[in-house]
Image (cartoon, rainbow, N blue to C red):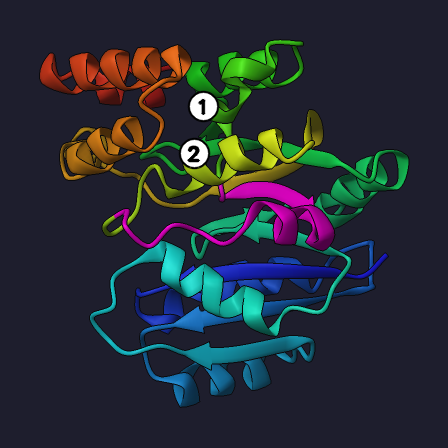
Amino acid sequence: MSVEVIIATNRPVSNLVPVLESYKEQSYKDFSIIIVTEGETLSLINICNKIDIKNVNIFSIPKGTNNAGASRNHAMMHATGDIILFSDDDMVVSPDFIAEHVEIHRKNENAIVRGLRYQKRVDGSFYLPHWEKVAMSHWNSQKREVAWAYFVTSNASVSSKLLKKAGDFDLNFEWSGCEDTDLAYRLIKAGGQPIANNRAVNYHLGIDDVQSKFERRIKNFEYLQTKYPKDPSIKWFVRLTLRAIEKGQINQLFMGE
């Protein structure tokens, strides 16, 4: 099975060096990487040449687009792999990262695979956030009506056939946030089966103020609810998230150990 790894970025391309180096060590070899950048493609090409990684295809969208869904849709236009694997521009992957995703897809053609994400501490060590443990527990349960709430495009894969059936990212979501939740919702409605794999591991190098990010996403949560007004699980998800944002609890929820 061929795999297309999709990475969207609007950061300085030098940030991708450790990310790309980690893909050089993959045990599974039948893959390529599509990077969609808002930056200068020549600098990224030079980086790929310097670290000697061959299987990277680079595309550019206009600077200032600032829409993660648009970047990933652009990448999917050029993807030819059997499996589409989403990761981020600040996620270093484990040596069997791709192999572990593929293993699940070989057993289930309708799988929506979610891997495990570790978070970096200020001292450079990594830990598994409490939210990640809860997310993986729900993803492996039979609660399909809420599994979409724990889908993340920083460690998830789906067959290209299922993705085509569900459709592209909705560009009405501004910047980033909820566009992946919405896609997961549609993937499950299209017949996708959520399956977690704790061995598909990657590591987040960034240390973010998640509260600030979520405050910028309030309109996206509101739009998600208007998109599915008759679904009580969407209403529940949006209400709980907006309440946590209002109370300033997001960093604790998502980054707590």
Q: Are marks 1 and 2 in contact (CB under 8 Å)?
A: yes
Image coordinates for residue 124, horizontal then vertical, percent = 40, 38
Residue at x 26% of width, y 30% of height: 226
Q: Which mark is residue 28?
A: none
Distance, label 1 to label 2, CA atoms, is 6 Å
Image coordinates for residue 195, horizontal then vertical, percent = 70, 26
Please name whichever residue, 120 or 143, is drawn nearer the observer in this view of the structure: 143
Residue at x 46% of width, y 60% of height: 72
Three-letter code for the amino acid on which mark 1 is drawn = Ala
Looking at the image, is 96 positioned above or below residue 119?
below
Image coordinates for residue 22, horizontal then vertical, percent = 62, 57
Q: Which residue is mark 2?
A: 181
Disc 1 is placed on an element classified as: helix
* Residue 154 sits inside the magenta stretch: yes
Residue bounds of the magenta highlight: 153-173
Classify residue 205 as left or right of residue 139.
left
Residue placed furthest toward the right: 107
Is residue 98 something that shows in the picture? yes
Looking at the image, is 151 positioned above or below residue 21?
above
Q: Which residue is mark 1?
A: 149
Please name whichever residue, 155 or 107, is drawn nearer the observer in this view of the structure: 107
